[in-house]
Image: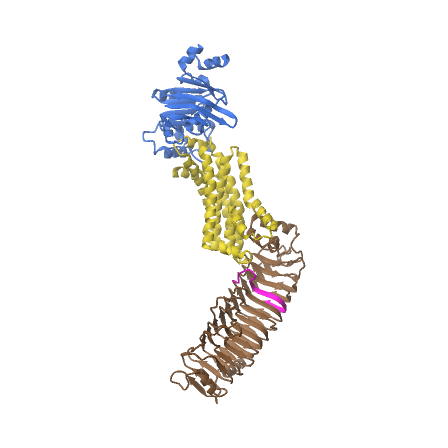
Amino acid sequence: MIIATNVTKKFGRLTVLNNVSVNCNKGECIALIGPNGSGKTTLVKSILGMVVPDSGFITFNGLNILHNWEYRRHIGYMPQIGRYPENMTIGHAFAMMKDIRKAEHHGPLDEELLHSFGLPTIMEKRMRTLSGGTTQRVSAALAFLFNPDVLILDEPTAGLDPIASEILKEKIVKEKERGKLIIITSHILSELDDLVTQVIYMQDGNLLFHKSLQNLQKDTGEAKLSRAIAFIMKSK
Amino acid sequence: MIKIIKHVIADILRNKIVIAYTIFLLAIGMSVFNLEDNTTKGLLSLLNIVLIVVPLVCIIFSTIYVYNSAEFVELLVSQPLQRKHIWLSLFSGIALALTLAFFIGIGIPVLLYSFTATGLILVGVGLLLTTIFVAIALLAAVHTRDKAKGIGIAVLLWLYFSLLFDGLILFILFQFSDYPLENLMLVLSALNPVDMGRILILLKMDVSALMGYTGAIFQNFFGTTTGIISTLLVMLLWIVLPMGFSLRKFKRKDL
Amino acid sequence: MKSFLLCIGFMCGVYCIPIHAAIVYVGKGHAYVSIQQAVTAAKNGDTVWVAPGIYKEKNIIIEKPLVLLGENYPVIDGEHTYQMISVRANEVTIKGFKLIHSGTSSLIDIAGIKVYDVKNINIENNVLEDTFFGIYLQGATNCIIKNNRLTAYAKTDQQSGNGIHCWKCDSLNIIGNMVTGHRDGIYFEFVTNSLIWKNRSIKNSRYGLHFMFSHNDAYIANIFQNNSAGVSVMFTHGVKMFNNVFEDNWGDGCYGIFLKEITDSHISGNTFLRNTTAIFFEGATRVLVEKNTFIKNGWAVKIQANSIQNTITHNNFLANSFDIATNGSLVENTFNKNYWDKYEGYDLNKDGVGDVPYHPVSMFSMIVAENPTAMILFRSFMATLFDKTEKILPSLTPENLVDKFPYMKPLRL
C-alpha cells in the first residue's frame, strides 16, 4: 500500500534518512521504533508529504506522492504534539476538519473515540485552555474520525492517562482487525506488544530491519518486544 | 480554501492582540478628530499611525502568528489539502483580519469625521500597507525556522522600510546633489511601499507644497491617472511578489 | 441726510446727461451708421447712443469730452487688426459695449480701450473679449474703471497683453472688474494714490496683480486666483493690501504675494488659501503682516534674510505644509503673537498665550531649502524624527526666529 524506495533526506549535513526502503501493506500494524533522532518522525513526515525527500520516492497505492495531495484523504494522522489555533474551541476544530474533508469523505464518520474520550461535554473549551492529554485526545479522535484506510500515529500514548491510553489501544486493535494499515512510532515498547504485527527498527537514519513480530521473537528468542529490541541493541 | 480562511479569521478575530490593536486604533482614530478642531491636523496624526504603527504591528503580529501556527499548519498539510491553498488561506486570513481591524479602528473615524479625498486615500494606503506587511512577514517567517530569529528579521525589515531606506535616500540626495535626481527618486520610491503610500497621501495633503520644487516630476507622474494607477500596481506587486516568493518556498519546505 | 444728498449729487454728476447736451444716435435707421462719424459730428459733452449691432470701425478716436453709451452691448470688432477705441480727451465716458478681436503686435501695445494722457475718464460695464491689452491707461489721472469683464484666450505670454494696464497714472479707481486669460490681470507701473477694490483676477498666464514703483495704493477685497505666478509687487512703498483673497496660485516660483523691495506697507485681513508660497519676502522692510489667515499653503511665509524690520503678528496659520522658511540664520523680523496650529506647547496660567515659545521653522524645511528634491521624504518617519530632535536640541534652525507669545486658539478675524 505504501512503498518507500531508496528515500534519502538530509537536513544540512545531517543525514536523517539514508536510502530507506520500506513496504507497508493493508492489515498490518507496524511499530516504527528506534532511539531519538533515528529518523522515525522524518520517515512518517515523508509519507505524509510534509518532508520532501532529496532522492528516492514514495508511492501510495501505486501513485507517487510527490506533488500529489489527494492521497492524504486515505490517511488519518495523529501528530506527536497537536497544537491548534489557540482561540479555536474543540467543537470548532472538529467542524473545521469536517469542513476540510467533507468534499472527499462520503461514508459515515467514526465518532467512537470522540465519545469514549468524553469530548462532547467539553466542545466549548478553547484550545489554549486544554491540557496536553486532552489535546492528544482531540488529535486522536480527529485522526480516526474519517474512517481512513491508513492511520499514522506519532507517539500516540505520550501524555495520555492510562485509561485513555487503554481506550486508544483497543481502538487501534479494532481498526487493525478491520484490515487497516496502522503505523505507530513509539518509545514505550511495552505497550506495543499486543498491537503490532511488524517492527521497523531505525537507527541514525538507517533502516536496520523490517520484520514481522513472530520472526523477531524467533530470531531473538524473546517473547517481549522490549526485550527483543534490547537483545538486538546489545548484539550490535 | 475559503473554509480554512474562515477558520483562520475566526481564530484571529478572537485574538487578544488583534482586539487590543483594533481598540487602540479606534481610540486614536476617534480622539484625534475629537481633540483637534481641524480635521487636517487629525489626518496628519493618523498619517504617522498608518506609516509607522500599522506596518510594525502587522509585520510582527503576522510573523508571530505564523510561528505559533507551525503545528497547526503541519496538521493541515497532513490533510488532503494543497499546500498552495493552505499558505494562501493563512495569508488571506491574517490579512483580512488585520485589514478589518484597521478599517474599524481608522477607517470608520475617518469616514465619519473626514470624508475627503485625503481621508479616503489615507484609509486606502493603510489597507494596502496592512496587506503588504502581512505578505512581507510571511516571507520572513517562511525563510527561518527559528522564531526569535524570524521576529528579529521582521523588526529589521520594518526598520528598513520606515527609517533606513529613507536615510539612504537622503544620503544619496545630498551626496549627488549636483545631479538631477528627480527621476531616480521616482524609481527608488517604488522600492519602498511605505514611501509610495506616503507620497500618495502627500499628493493630496501637501499638494500646494509639492507644486513647488520637484513639482514637474510629481505632477507629471503621480498626479496623473496613469501615475496613480501605476503606483497602485506597484503596491499590489508588493503584495504579489513577497507572497509569490514565500509560496514557492512554502511548497518545498520541510515541516 | 448728508450722505443721501451726497449720493444724489454723485448720481447726477455721473449719470445725468447735461441739460444742454444733445444725443447722437448710431445704428440701423439712425442718422449715423458709424460710431466714428457720430463721434466726429458730436459736440463737446454730447452723448453718442449706439444701437445693438456689429460695428467694424478700425479704431474709434475720441478727441472731445463725450459720453459713449451702448444699448444692449453693441459689438465693436477689431477684426484681429485694430485697436477699438482711443481716448485722447478729458471727461469721456464709455459704457455698455462689447469689444472683441483686437489686433496683436509685438511693437505697439494694441488695446481694447486705450486712454492717452487725459483725466476724468469713466469706463464702465464693458465686455472685452479676445483683446491683446484690455483697458490701457497711460498718463491718465482720476479715472474710474468699473465692472468690466475682460477675457483673453492667448496661449503664450508673447501673444497676450495685460488686462488692465496702467502706466504713469494717478488717482485711479479700479472697481469690480473681472480679468481672466491675460498676461497680467492688473498691471501698474508708476501709478500712485489709487484704489483697487473688489476685482477678480483669475487664471492669467503670469501675474494676477503686478505692480512696480506704484506708491500709496490700496488693494482691498480683491480675489487673485489660479494665476500661474500669483501676485508680484516690487519697488514700492506705502502699499495697503486689505481683505484680499489669494487662492490656488500653484507652481515653482509662484506666490500668493511676492514682495520685492517693498517698504512701509500694510498687509491685513487677507486670506491665503492653497498657494505654493503664500508670501515671499525679498528685501522687504517695515511691512506689517497682521490678521491674515494662511490655510493649506505649501509655505505660508518664506522670508529671505535681506528682509528686515517686518512684523508678522495676529495671523492664523492653519494646515500649511510649512509655516515659515528662511535662507539664513540672521533674522531681524518679529513673529510674535500668532496662532500656529503646529504649536504643541501648554498654557498653565490660562491667559490664552502659550508658555513656551514656538519656533515656526522646522528642521525639515531647512533640509528642503538646501535640497529641494528631499521633498520626496516629507512626512516620513525620518523627517518627523529630525523635527522632534531639532525641537529638543536646536542646531540648524535660526534660534531667534521665534514666536514668544503664540496663541493657544485660532484668532477670530
Residue sitting at x 39%, y 39%:
B2
Whether C254 is among the magenta residues is yes
Q: Residue C31: image x %, image y %?
A: 41, 87
Q: Position of residue A137 (x, y in %)?
A: 42, 27
**Vertical comparison of B159 with C25: above or below:** above
The x, y position of residue A29, in whole percent, is 39, 20
Residue B49 can be seen, yes or no: no
Q: Quadrant of residue C209?
A: bottom right
**Magenta includes A120?**
no
| Scheme by which the image is coloured | by chain
Can you see residue B90? yes
**Residue lying furthest top:** A221
Of residues C190 and A32, which is closer to you in this image?
C190
Of helix, strand and loop, which mostly describes the magenta segment?
Answer: strand
Chain in yellow (letter): B
Image quadrant containing the N terminus of chain A: top left
- On the image, the x and y values in percent for residue C395 come to 66, 52
Q: Nearer the viewer, residue B221 or C10?
A: B221
What residue lies at 55% left-to-right and 40% top-to-bottom? B155
Note whether C245 is above or below B186 in the view shown: below
* Snapshot quadrant of residue C252: bottom right
Query: In the rendered picture, chain A carries what hue?
Result: blue
Residues rendered magenta in the picture: C248-267
Judging by colour alone, the chain drawn in brown in this rendered image is C
The quadrant where residue A182 appears = top left
Nearest the camera: C124 or B7?
C124
Give the number of marks: 0
| Residue farthest toward the front in the current orientation of the protein | C107
Q: Residue furthest bottom?
A: C20
